[in-house]
Amino acid sequence: MIILFGLFVRYDEESDAHWSEHKHENNITSDIENDFYYRYPSFQDVHVMIFVGFGFLMTFLKRYSFGGVGFNFLIAAFGLQWALLMQGWFHSLDPADGQIKIGIENIINADFCVAGCLIAYGALLGKVSPVQLMVLTLFGITLFAVEEYIILHVLHVRDAGGSMVIHTFGAYYGLTISWILYRPKLNQSKNLSGSVYHSDVFAMIGTLFLWMFWPSFNSAIADHGDGQHRAAINTYLALAASVLTTFAISSLSAKRGKLDMVHIQNATLAGGVAMGTAAEFMITTYGSLIVGFCCGIISTFGYLVITPFMEKYMKIQDTCGIHNLHAMPGVLGAVVGAITAATASESVYGHEGLVNTFDFKGKYAERTPAMQGGFQAAGLCVALAFGIVGGAIVGFILRLPFWGDPSDDNCFDDELYWEKCSLVFPSI
Amino acid sequence: MIILFGLFVRYDEESDAHWSEHKHENNITSDIENDFYYRYPSFQDVHVMIFVGFGFLMTFLKRYSFGGVGFNFLIAAFGLQWALLMQGWFHSLDPADGQIKIGIENIINADFCVAGCLIAYGALLGKVSPVQLMVLTLFGITLFAVEEYIILHVLHVRDAGGSMVIHTFGAYYGLTISWILYRPKLNQSKNLSGSVYHSDVFAMIGTLFLWMFWPSFNSAIADHGDGQHRAAINTYLALAASVLTTFAISSLSAKRGKLDMVHIQNATLAGGVAMGTAAEFMITTYGSLIVGFCCGIISTFGYLVITPFMEKYMKIQDTCGIHNLHAMPGVLGAVVGAITAATASESVYGHEGLVNTFDFKGKYAERTPAMQGGFQAAGLCVALAFGIVGGAIVGFILRLPFWGDPSDDNCFDDELYWEKCSLVFPSI
Amino acid sequence: MIILFGLFVRYDEESDAHWSEHKHENNITSDIENDFYYRYPSFQDVHVMIFVGFGFLMTFLKRYSFGGVGFNFLIAAFGLQWALLMQGWFHSLDPADGQIKIGIENIINADFCVAGCLIAYGALLGKVSPVQLMVLTLFGITLFAVEEYIILHVLHVRDAGGSMVIHTFGAYYGLTISWILYRPKLNQSKNLSGSVYHSDVFAMIGTLFLWMFWPSFNSAIADHGDGQHRAAINTYLALAASVLTTFAISSLSAKRGKLDMVHIQNATLAGGVAMGTAAEFMITTYGSLIVGFCCGIISTFGYLVITPFMEKYMKIQDTCGIHNLHAMPGVLGAVVGAITAATASESVYGHEGLVNTFDFKGKYAERTPAMQGGFQAAGLCVALAFGIVGGAIVGFILRLPFWGDPSDDNCFDDELYWEKCSLVFPSI
């Protein structure tokens, strides 16, 4: 990694000490115009989502909290280095000298790239070894970079918060791997596959940080100015609507109206996933609420019905229920994005606003909103294809017998990979 | 909610895609002048305070951690949608087309509005049903919006961090409801009304996030530039002073000098509450320390003496002690604000600074600091009146028999509203 | 404290209400040029590191979580007030009126100053009384301010993230005190000196917030523009590399390849410590990775070998292992900084970039990079000397018999200082 960085990675204009000269040449009058100040607060929020959000959301298992937060930490830290290289080769290569120029936007994108792999980890939580996770991440990041290049650059699709690029891809990648690594005797670990009281409270730390910072996630790389502003507000509204429907459906579906902590921890976030594509568009405030409302229903319903169905009949064991939180809302988000793009008009966006929002510049100057809608839909197909085909290939690699995966009766147990757990674990 | 948003809510100029044209018209040269960049970091800090701060502070009960963080999540997410509408009607209605224009400042204000209701929840924690909380929030937000309109717009009072508008109102609203819902046999739930070791550590997550981000809370909607800067510094100093006095009083008041975790979790925050009005004024650094010092004493003393007294003789059961953390420091903060305003002068603020800080513009151009001090005091009376009268009305509504509130021996128990708690709860 | 603030502390130009006039005089066109907007997001990240990061990292002991997070809170809040005065006298004294002018940069520096004392607390965790901690903080802050003045102003050394000023000083200060307060019979508290499952998960909250926000720590007071940008990216890379080597070494060193939670909680952070000096330099991306790589190895190796060795043969009991996390990486960081500075050139930095990065202005206009390298090395010696000599003096003061320190069999036990712990503590 060090050698690759040494050969290929350099600072970009805004993080290089030649910035002062760059300012003079480009008539930039103030340091605050450095992209750093537009994006750093959002970057840190995204960073918190990746490490604390995903990490703590995965501590809910009664004896796999170390693995949840620890392996999340490992693969995220590994993945973001690899992502800087992979995404850099596709997106930030400077043709003048053949080197990757990195700045704040690259490290946000690396976090996004890692998010795709962490989503996939959600389906496999407790059932794979750390070495398998490293392999999953290595291939996942690579596939992600190619998929993202095709969607964003070849098809020129807009996907600032990654409904397609991150969530749809990540979820189908993980679900396909989980399907290939199906364990028919997983119920031997049944006594460890639930939560205890305090592990559920730990998981709520993850849920809340994901929920709060999702507006930053969807706006982090949106256009300066109104784009970031609107993306944050739309996501905020969709998330708020998801919470209400999740509580309602969770309560209505249970005997005696009790709430299920699994729904609250997960389905409340579905609105953010589904706004990943459309957040920067003029989807309107009530449009955002409708998206959040629908996702809360779909996602909670998924936990109630679809996850058990998939486990029983389709042989897909999905520990965290990523199908409900990422796959379905991601696809929905892509569809919403395509429709919103297709119906965009100058009367709603203004001429300049339309050009900026969809980046109808250069060789895309002739593209119309209707065409853009079609390309958005094509982007979704690409994400699905990469997730499923990539997942199948990586799944077969991970089935090779030398990765040290746990036996069926050792799943969901930290003792296998962590020192001293048995000594310190309270009686269950 | 979706229909109401559809009818009434639109993006404002800075979150609308017409921003580019708005920039040209108003000679704004850079996207970084979008209000988003002035306020978004503070917004996220406030957001963390609402969801993680309040949420985790309320996990301290040994068997009500799910309810503490979960219902806090529910009513905050519900409340902020309702608040966007209610506050919008009063503050952001565009007279040209009769629609509410929302941007970053509106979503910060919605979080503030929700804070008032979460404070009220603190007095009722563990004793009411989620449906009652929704009703409390619905009316609370509505009352808040009216009260805020009268205080900030009719009386033209300055209250950037909401000592009056948020804390005084919210606390008396909650205490009055608690008084009306008095449960004489609450000691039947006595064995569940305490904490366990780890629930106290969870609560410290809430305390620390509230404490750290309070400077953002008090500065989030202060004036651009020196106003936000000064509000953050003043709040920071007051909070630091509160911590020292809280530790000192807690230790001095106990046999053998032991500290009480309840004081540390709560009274350390009192300085932030009390700086809610005066933070953006030129209260001086030592003025901030004095306010923090006094509040730490008053608040810790409240936990030691006043809360037990109120429960025994005044029939007010205050689960989280909001009287000590919000009511008394809120009133003190309003008084400090009135005095600081009344003694403001051009020699201290400069001519332009005085006009900006107190917004002596337009029809308020003739107002003097002394008059402003009087209006500040009037604002406090309005907040108190709305809290007590509003709380009384809502209290009687909540006493109606069909809200599904827990019986006296089921209070402070998650099992009533959450699935599977009994299975996963460790022995106490 | 209030009196001292009343006599000496005033708002600076950017937090004073005269800012409007200051703007006119200096042709500043926008409020966003107020230093507040350059630094506030980083400030809040640093603030989270101090209170949540350090605080929760120290909750890992099974019965000392209250003391870990609570006393951290106390000494941080006390220390930052004292630091504003001490650092103010040395750095921000306005010669015109003999008063300290404070703004956002001062409160960031106060947090930095406090960090030095919290590092020292790490060595003493569980073995000293709160009164001893107050004394340690009082002297520590004072020593820090003098040491910082000598290093940054007299020697004109660059140390934006404080490898020398904060980490090296703080660690040797704490280790020397711990050496003087050596307890030969500490093994009487052996049964309380470990962790339990959930206390380790709490500690991971601290680890992750430290890890995520370290780029803000190292960039918080770096130069506007490219300096802050580059410091964040370099730190991010070094931290990512540390995580990988820590997991690798931890796994390779154990029988059956199991991971040790102590390493993951601590050694993963070493890369951030070691980038404290060089982060704002043009150290290159692969340079950052190399530093992180080396530190992960050194630090994990320290936990495996050096800490037990020091405890057995050198009579230094280091509860949190600060020698591995702060002392060694801090010294390494200072050396890396000196080398990077000595090899700086105009071809890499550009003329203006070199002047800005090393502040070769005014009376330092004649300094060359090679000379700067020498001064950087001299700065390290000053930090070491202050840490060791200061620690020795304060250690002897703390050995006086009236500070109420715990007996050897009461160490690591919250019951001594906190009410009701025994009632609420779960069986171990």
Image: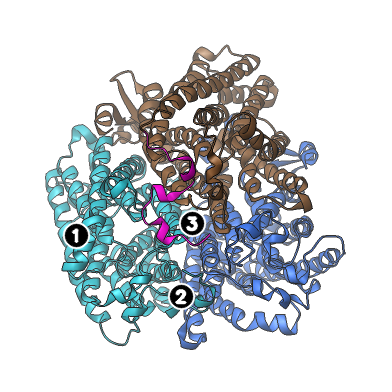
Chain colours: A brown, B blue, C cyan
The three-letter amino acid code for the residue at tag 2 is Leu
Residue C302 visible to the viewer: yes
Instruction: Tell me residue C96's x, y (percent).
Output: 33, 66
Q: Is residue B206 above or below residue C332?
A: below
Q: As displayed, is residue A290 above or below residue B232?
A: above
Q: Secondary structure at mark 1?
A: helix
Q: How many numbered tags mark residues here? A: 3
Q: Position of residue B202 (x, y in %)?
A: 53, 62
Q: Which residue is mark 3?
A: B229
Is residue C79 rendered to the left or right of residue C163? right
Q: Secondary structure at mark 3?
A: helix
| Subunit ID for the residue under disc 3 | B
User: Going 56% across and 78% down the picture, which residue do you hit?
Assistant: B300
Q: Nearer the viewer, residue A44 or A282?
A: A44
Q: Residue A401, percent across and down?
A: 38, 30
For the question of whether residue B39 can be seen, the reply is no
**Residue labelled with disc 2:** B244
Mark carried by residue B421:
none
Q: Could you tell me which residue is drawn at 50 percent across and 75 percent down?
A: C421
Q: Main secondary structure of the magenta part?
A: loop
Query: Quick one: A368 or A264, which is closer to the camera?
Result: A264
**Magenta highlight on residue A419:** yes
Magenta-drawn segment: A403-428
Residue pointed to by mark 1: C154
Q: Nearer the observer, disc 2 or disc 3?
A: 2
